[in-house]
Image: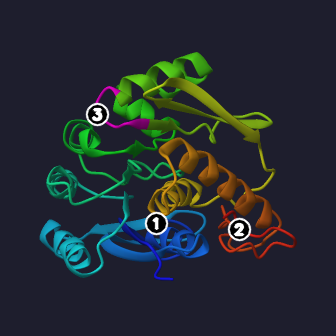
Amino acid sequence: MTPKVALTIAGSDSGGGAGLQADLKTFAALGVYGTSAVTAVTAQHTAAVLRAVPLDPDTVLAQVHAVLADLPPAAVKTGMLANPEIVKGVADVASRGLLPNLVVDPVLVSTSGHSLMDVGGVDAYRELLFPHALVVTPNLHEAALLAGIDVSDLTAVEARMQVAESLRRLGPTMVVLKGGHLDGDSSTDVVAGPGGVITLGSARVDTTNDHGTGCSLSAAIAAYLALGASPIDAVERAKSYVHEALLGAARWQLGSGHGPIDHFGWGEGLPPGR
């Protein structure tokens, strides 16, 4: 049977654990044919982002239009867009209804604190791209930047629920505010949708191999949307997929920092979520 197509518009990770490499692995693991538009080239490994060089917006959009012309996707996700001009270009394509089931992962800063977006990017996301998104998936630091508050203000789940709903009012159908960077034995994501705000919890996996979890989550949401899942079902199944991928890689020793997750279920007894 001909597979569904998904498109990732994201930066390249030379270490292979995040960015479009993680997206394409996730698409493949979930049975979706992956296509890509490269927005930036990064020099990075498991411990740090050493350099990030964005492509010019015209080259990014040429890739997008090439895919759309010949391999129309059933779902699209964005990762690192690098600068406001690329955000604006992608938003323009989305405004014409050409990016179905759009999942926006607003990549603004790396876990190590390296900025991955030029000045003006936060406003570009809020004003231009979010109105065309089906699902937006900020982590705590990104949500704080987007809401104009300090990340310490998001410790309480009630505060995260309020911010998730405030971001949803910018236009996306659903906002998934990820709680993976919080301390504790569990990870609670806040999901704001048309039916209200709910929480999705899961046991925290004791591992430092968590590089690319955000990229993989948004890619998995896009993959499940491409396969016909509803937004909330796609979010729940994607969360389960990433949890299994964390378990599978928990004891891996790849790199000196935060290693990659197990996209393909190589861990014993842990097939990828379907």
Q: Residue at x 43, y 36 (%)?
A: 174
Q: To which residue does mark 3 refer?
A: 171
Res 19 label? 1
The residue sitting at 16% across, 50% down in the picture is 95
Above or below, 44 relative to 230: below
Q: Quadrant of residue 78?
A: bottom left
Disc tally is 3
Q: Eyeballing the image, is 83 above or below 198?
A: below
Q: Residue furthest right?
A: 269
Distance, label 3 to label 1, CA atoms, is 25 Å
Q: Nearer the viewer, residue 64 or 146?
A: 64
Secondary structure of the residue carrying numbered label 1: helix
Label 3 vs 1, first from the N-terminus: 1
Kind of element beneath mark 3: loop
* Principal secondary structure, stretch drawn in magenta: loop
Q: CA distance from mark 2 to mark 1?
A: 19 Å
Q: Which amino acid does the dot numbered 3 rest on? A: Gly
Q: Which quarter of the figure has residue 142?
A: top left
Q: Quadrant of the C terminus?
A: bottom right
Which residue matches tag 2?
272
Residue type (three-letter) at the residue carrying disc 2: Pro
What range is drawn magenta here? 169-174
Q: Is residue 186 magenta?
A: no
Q: Nearer the viewer, residue 155 or 171?
A: 171
**Residue 105's spot in the image, x, y percent?**
41, 50
> In the rendered structure, which disc, 2 or 3, sits on the residue that comes first in sequence?
3
